[in-house]
Image (cartoon, rainbow, N blue to C red):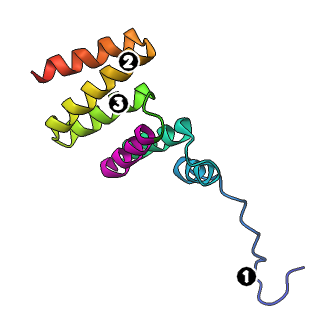
Amino acid sequence: MLSGTPFAFRQRSPHPKQMDKIAMLTEILKQNPTDAFARYGLAMAYSSEGKQEAALTEFSTILQHTPDYVPAYQMSAQELLKAGRTDEARERLAAGLAACERTNNAHAASEMQAMLDDLS
């Protein structure tokens, strides 16, 4: 029986909330700051929430630590284009094409070259 007034309900402990993607990836990166896969996921999560500058910061961090992480070039170029930063996007695509050459990634190279051609 509940004590007090008839409307006094015992508070349940809230169930632990599932960590959102950004919080989860941030936690992973605290343990391993150079985890390119986790950082890429964080950048993409920021991008999907419209947080362009945060996404671009994460993409740049990936490329500082893992310069051959090809997807970061392409996606950051797309973010730069969304932000109207065309010259920076061109530079990022050119650097991405060099990474594609180093890693023999012809598929990504063709996609990035097409993006670059569209900017001409």
Residue 3, image x and y in percent? 85, 87
* Residue, disc 1: 7
* Residue, disc 2: 100
Q: Nearer the viewer, mark 2 or mark 3?
A: 2
68 up-or-down from 26: above or below:
above
Identified at 41% across, 18% down, the residue is 102
* Residue, disc 3: 73
Identified at 47% across, 35% down, the residue is 66
4 up-or-down from 15: above or below:
below
Residue closest to the far right: 1
Instruction: Give the mark, 2 or 3, whose residue is nearer the N terminus.
Output: 3
56 up-or-down from 23: above or below:
above
Instruction: Give the mark, 1 or 2, whose residue is nearer the N terminus.
Output: 1
Kindly indicate the quadrant of the structure image that contains residue 96: top left
* Range covered by the magenta-colored residues: 51-64
Tell me if label 1 and label 2 are in contact, CB under 8 Å: no
Residue 63, image x and y in percent? 41, 37
Residue closest to the far bottom: 4
Disc 2 residue type (three-letter)? Cys
| Residue 59 is a magenta residue | yes
| Residue 94 is a magenta residue | no
Q: Quadrant of the N terminus?
A: bottom right
Q: Secondary structure at mark 3?
A: helix
Disc 3 residue type (three-letter)? Tyr
Q: Quadrant of the C terminus?
A: top left
Q: Nearer the viewer, residue 5 or 10?
A: 10
Q: Secondary structure at mark 2?
A: helix
Q: Is residue 7 left or right of residue 92?
A: right
Give the prevailing secondary structure in the magenta stretch. helix
Q: Nearer the viewer, mark 1 or mark 3?
A: 3
